[in-house]
Image (cartoon, coloured by chain):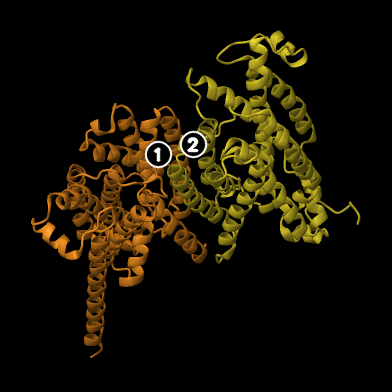
Amino acid sequence: MSQQTAAGTGPLGRLDEVKLRSRPWAATLILVGGLVALALGIAVSVSFGAADIQLPVVWNAIFHFNPDITDHQIIRELRLPRVLGGVMIGASFAVAGAVMQGMTRNPLADSGLMGINSGAGFALALCFAFMPNLPFMSLILYSFVGAGAGAAIVYGVGSLAKGGLTPARLVLAGAALSALLSALSEGVALYYKIGQDLAFWYAGGIAGTKWFQLKIMFPWVFAAVLGAIALSRSITMLSLGDDVAKGLGQRTGLVKLAGALIVLVLAGSSVSVVGAVGFIGLIIPHLTRYLVGVDYRWIIPCSAVLGSLLVVLADLAARTIIPQHETPLGAVLALIGVPFFLYLARKERREL
Amino acid sequence: MSKTTAISFDEVRRKRGFRVLAVIAVLIVAAFIISVNTGYIRLTPLELLHTLLGRGTDKQELILFDFRLPRIVISILIGAGLAVSGAVMQGVFRNDLADPGILGINAGAGLMVMLLISFYPATSAAPVFMLPLVAFVGAACTAAMIYALAYKRHQGISPIRLLLTGVAVAAGMSAAMIVLTLRLDPDKYQFVATWLAGSIWGTSWKFVLSLLPWILILLPYVIYKARVMNVLNLGDQTATGLGAAVTKEQFRLLGAAVGLAAASVAVSGGIGFVGLIGPHLARRLVGPKHQLMLPASALLGSLLVLTADTIGRWILQPSEIPTGIVVAVIGAPYFLYLLARTKS
């Protein structure tokens, strides 16, 4: 296998093209700059709120914790877990979206649009209603199962159709399934009077994130993001088309299965903490591709950083839009995401 | 000879269509009898007849006239309204999957109703006759927005872009609605949540009266336009060639469809999928000609909502499942099935 093939001829040439069209410098800049911005965002988010707390106090609360000081308590028990939860789910949804968009070559792929989030949400509604004292670990597992079931139904319906799985078909199937599952969740919620708890939680609240949730969630998310990075080269090949990937000797079925598992773990665990937040996985990969090119080895880590940044900033906005009132994070993201989605839907020339 | 057979074939078809309509009507009557009997207190058909003729006991009269009948009448009206609204949208946009729920028009109407309700201290204080009007404003704005967003110069409206736009707009509306609902106090929240899930909450004659003019004016208007709709179905160019003012007619029909959907949403919250299923089943039973298809849609929609409402009241007695949830449980799988069958 020589790397000397002229660009644009044969599978290897296509890979060269990917190299030409990726911008490693831009990507490095985003990774470094994004992490710095994220650190700043976290600092602002922790010190800013109903009670403004000076940054030195924040520093002390983290490194010289004194349980007798109220501010230290606020930071330790409320703001820090909240902002770290935001970082985690931002990275999860963004990476899940990037993996899905790369593998399916579908610009509208997003766990929120494809029934995965609502599947996990329905599983959780059932848990809330029938097993209110379930430990969080089991909740996460149930929400994996729900996410998987949702994805399987949407994919199944999309693939059954003549003409195969077009992006639009996937979105419509996802919308119908979400309608069905949210109707069922609402029915369960109304009957068991768990409505407002669920609603707060569905609306994408990271406000109630607890340390133990983070502890349980972290290994899953960490492993899944690492897995996505490990898989990123294969995802780049898949994004060139199945035939190209096969021509380069890739076992596409295996890669797709691994990718699907990663997506389910990321979406399932995130939904179990914050509820069904959509649009992160839709917006961020597009933005990242625009900035760093088409190589998923750069797209996936950059998506993780930018996704975290988006959620931390959206959460800050959610706390400040209407003072004294928490605007749900999911609503803020939808207000950013809907116009973006509409723009994508308009831009598509082909039968979307 | 061949001419006569052609005519007779048409005749046969029309006769068959009327037979189908009659069968659905009989089914609605059956559903009505079952529905009247669903609940705490049972009435035998004979008692029912006596009560209807004004010879029942006070208790029977109270249950029938003040609780069950208005609700049944409303189910029948909104079922017809939503189904015909969906039929018109499917016809005008030439898109089999169009429905006021999927296109986000119900969400727009709902958002305005929510706003109105949240400004009133108690739910009963909200002026009933304002509701359909307010809902209409919301629905019309939403429809205009979706149309503008999905329209592209030189291409017009592509069916799939229309649906995607509708789905997105509905998501945006839901987000706005969530922001609103969370700021309500718990009692009101419970009411609004139930309403959003599509429960027929206007269970008094007041609501029937506020809904009735909308249905009574718009439904016959749309059926009167059946021929125009047949022509529109042939495609814009053919229809123009046949002398139809295409854009004007589309605008009028869509206005009527939006009105029907909005008035229905105002008293029943977000019941989706009726506008999708009704017309589809109607087309299968009586064919695509709108003269028969529209009345059949109306009847099937009524039957669907009435049945769903009865199931919702019966399944978890004494508590209720909102009708919209029952309809979604029936309707969403059907939508998925249609999606799997249509070619891209």
* Count of numbered circles in the view: 2
Report which residue position mark 2 lands on: A199
Q: Residue furthest bottom?
A: B1
Front-most of residues B203 and A100: B203
Front-most of residues B185 and B47: B47
Mark 2 falls on what kind of element? helix
> Where does the image place residue B195, in percent across and percent down from the top left?
35, 41
Answer with the quarter of the image where residue A224 lies.
top right
Tell which chain the image draws in yellow. A
Q: Is residue A20 above or below residue A352?
A: above
Report which residue position mark 1 lands on: B193
> Where does the image place residue A130, in percent across and percent down from the top left?
54, 46
Q: Is residue A183 above or below residue B237?
A: above
Quadrant housing the N terminus of chain B: bottom left
Q: B150 left or right of A266?
A: left
Answer with the quarter of the image where residue B15 lies.
bottom left
> Where does the image place residue B94, in percent across and percent down from the top left?
38, 59
Q: Chain of mark 2?
A: A
Proximity of marks 2 and 1: CB atoms separated by less than 8 Å: yes
Q: Are marks 2 and 1 on the same chain?
A: no
> Where does the image place residue B186, in percent across and percent down from the top left?
40, 30
Q: A142 left or right of A3?
A: left
